[in-house]
């Protein structure tokens, strides 16, 4: 399956300094980190970057993070990080980082999971897997796109739902542990997909699945069972 | 050096086994693939060597299993940052398949492709001389579907995206032709010791 966009090797290969400008709490475990990156070349929703932290003794930790913000020309980007237990990099962000800190990033990387906003998009995410999908939703809104876009987002509980205040009619939340009164509790099922896949848009959906490996396996199998062609399912696994 | 305020990193095991920028994943074996895990049974699996060869050859499951067994015991390295030490794969050396097909002198590269459509390019020199395998066992057990079972390519001295899961064949070429991730911005060769991650490296 081809990537959706060309990636510029020179951009992908260059480390740039990113200055933290703002930290916003999303849920008790998740925060959004906003950075000024003056030389940022711009990105396409769905892309990620590589980030590195360097210790005094020269030790370097590198991790991949999806871009949460929609592409814009503000010279800023946003990442949304889950605080992983004992996590080396997410731990630093959640316990040490403050505005003014500088880190390094390279990217944007990979054209495979990118969504330029051209094809109908069916987005399935769980936990922090919603991050690159939110970039797509924000892009859709910011540009006033009319191409169909739907988001199914799975979270343990309403309090764990990242970007909860930002969803609109395009989004169906699925809660696996506890839910508001009247909403069922449980995993994403065929019933969530049936209405979308029994009446797909004219050219069909391009499906984007993002989350842990077990969520990616589950959600992609549901899609295939509901009739979505395998070559129109793109998967990003966070591990 | 651009040090990060207040960042020390966790107590770390470095050592001659760990390529730069990698960490030891311990018992974890993360799954990273961009596609749906296929329902591919051994009965449906075939492996073909074609392109610039004396005679293109195709093996089915039983035919491949009859070839002399060969194992890899050692380390693997994923471009996303984890390395896994002391893994054991069982299968057949790729040399055995290539000898039967007979690469032509003009063959310099190969594209390894999967039953799912995924592909990766490799210089032929990285696939010969006891450095690559087609494997169906991990730790003495059948290779799990999400890790590429029933059979995958293993080229342990390169980043693991080159070790094509659900491998379906090799096409031998007289030029380098980018595969799936290489078209998506990854490095053409992917040597972990030189940190050849992305195309600019
Ligand atoms: C393409 C991509 C995009 C991603 N996007 C996002 C995103 O938008 N948001 C997000 O939150 N995450 C994202 N991730 C996951 C992210 O890259 C990190 O894996 C995550 O933040 C954890 O990193 P960490 O350094 O905090 O944890 P790590 O230190 O890597 O720890 C992770 C787990 O492994 C264990 N562990 C790892 N190394 C060691 C060690 N040496 N010793 C002991 N234990 C160890 C830890 O105990 C912990 O349980 C993405 C991943 C990929 C591949």
Image (cartoon, coloured by chain):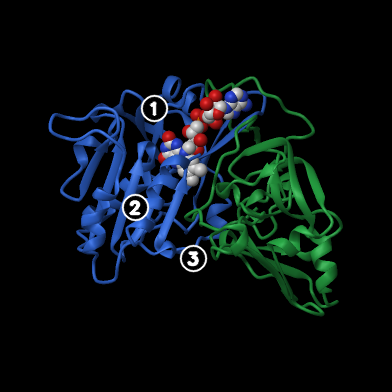
Chain colours: A blue, B green
- Depth check, front residue: A108 or B190: B190
Helix, strand or loop under label 2: loop
Looking at the rendering, which quadrant does residue A214 occupy? Answer: top left
Question: Mark 2 highlights which residue?
Answer: A71
Question: Mark 3 highlights which residue?
Answer: A1
Determine the chain carrying the residue at label 1.
Answer: A
Looking at the rendering, which quadrant does residue A201 occupy? Answer: bottom left
Label 2 vs 3, first from the N-terminus: 3
The answer to whether residue B119 is seen in the rendering is no
Q: Residue at coordinates 68% horizontally, 53% vertically from top-left? A: B190
**Numbered disc in front, either 2 or 3:** 3
Residue B148, image x, y percentages: 60, 52
Helix, strand or loop under label 3: loop
The answer to whether residue A167 is seen in the rendering is yes
**Residue B194: numbered disc:** none
Q: In this view, does B83 lie to the left or right of A29?
A: right
Label 2 vs 1, first from the N-terminus: 2
Q: In this view, does A79 lie to the left or right of B137?
A: left
Q: Quadrant of the N terminus of chain B?
A: top right
Question: Mark 1 highlights which residue?
Answer: A99
Residue B67, image x, y percentages: 81, 60
């Amino acid at each position: 399956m081809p990537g959706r966009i060309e990636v510029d090797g020179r951009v992908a290969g260059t480390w740039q300094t990113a200055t933290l400008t703002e930290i916003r709490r999303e849920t008790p475990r998740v925060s959004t980190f906003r950075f000024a990156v003056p030389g940022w070349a711009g990105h396409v929703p769905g892309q990620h970057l590589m980030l590195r932290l360097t210790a005094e003794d020269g030790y370097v930790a590198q991790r991949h993070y999806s871009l949460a913000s929609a592409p814009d020309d503000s010279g800023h980007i946003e990442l949304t990080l889950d605080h992983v237990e004992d996590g080396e990099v997410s731990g630093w962000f959640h316990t040490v980082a403050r505005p003014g800190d500088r880190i390094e990033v390279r990217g944007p990387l990979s054209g495979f999971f990118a969504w330029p906003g051209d094809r109908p998009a069916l987005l399935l995410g769980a936990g922090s897997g919603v991050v690159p999908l939110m970039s797509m939703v924000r892009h859709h809104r910011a540009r006033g796109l009319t191409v169909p876009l739907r988001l199914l987002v799975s979270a343990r509980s309403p309090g764990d739902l990242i970007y909860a205040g930002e969803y609109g009619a395009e989004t169906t939340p699925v809660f696996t542990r506890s839910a508001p009164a009247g909403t069922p509790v449980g995993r994403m099922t065929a019933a969530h997909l049936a209405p979308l896949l029994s009446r797909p848009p004219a050219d069909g959906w391009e499906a984007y699945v993002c989350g842990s490996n077990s969520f990616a396996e589950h959600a992609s199998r549901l899609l295939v069972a509901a009739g979505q062609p395998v070559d129109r399912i793109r998967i990003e696994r966070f591990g | 050096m651009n040090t990060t305020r207040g960042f020390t990193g966790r107590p770390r095991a470095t050592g001659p086994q760990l390529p730069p920028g990698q960490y030891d994943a311990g018992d974890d074996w993360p799954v990273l693939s961009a596609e749906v895990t296929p329902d591919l049974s051994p009965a449906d699996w075939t492996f073909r060597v074609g392109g610039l060869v004396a005679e293109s050859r195709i093996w089915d499951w039983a035919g491949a299993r009859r070839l002399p067994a060969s194992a890899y015991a050692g380390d693997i390295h994923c471009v996303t940052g984890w390395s896994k030490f002391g893994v054991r794969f069982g299968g057949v050396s790729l040399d055995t398949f290539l000898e039967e097909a007979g690469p032509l002198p003009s063959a310099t590269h190969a594209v390894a492709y999967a039953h799912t459509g995924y592909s990766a390019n490799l210089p032929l020199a990285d696939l010969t001389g006891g450095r690559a395998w087609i494997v169906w066992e991990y730790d003495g057990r059948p290779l799990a579907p999400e890790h590429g079972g029933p059979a995958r390519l293993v080229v342990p001295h390169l980043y693991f995206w080159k070790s094509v899961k659900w491998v379906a064949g090799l096409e031998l070429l007289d030029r380098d032709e980018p595969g799936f991730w290489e078209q998506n911005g990854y490095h053409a060769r992917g040597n972990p010791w030189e940190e050849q991650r992305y195309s600019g490296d």
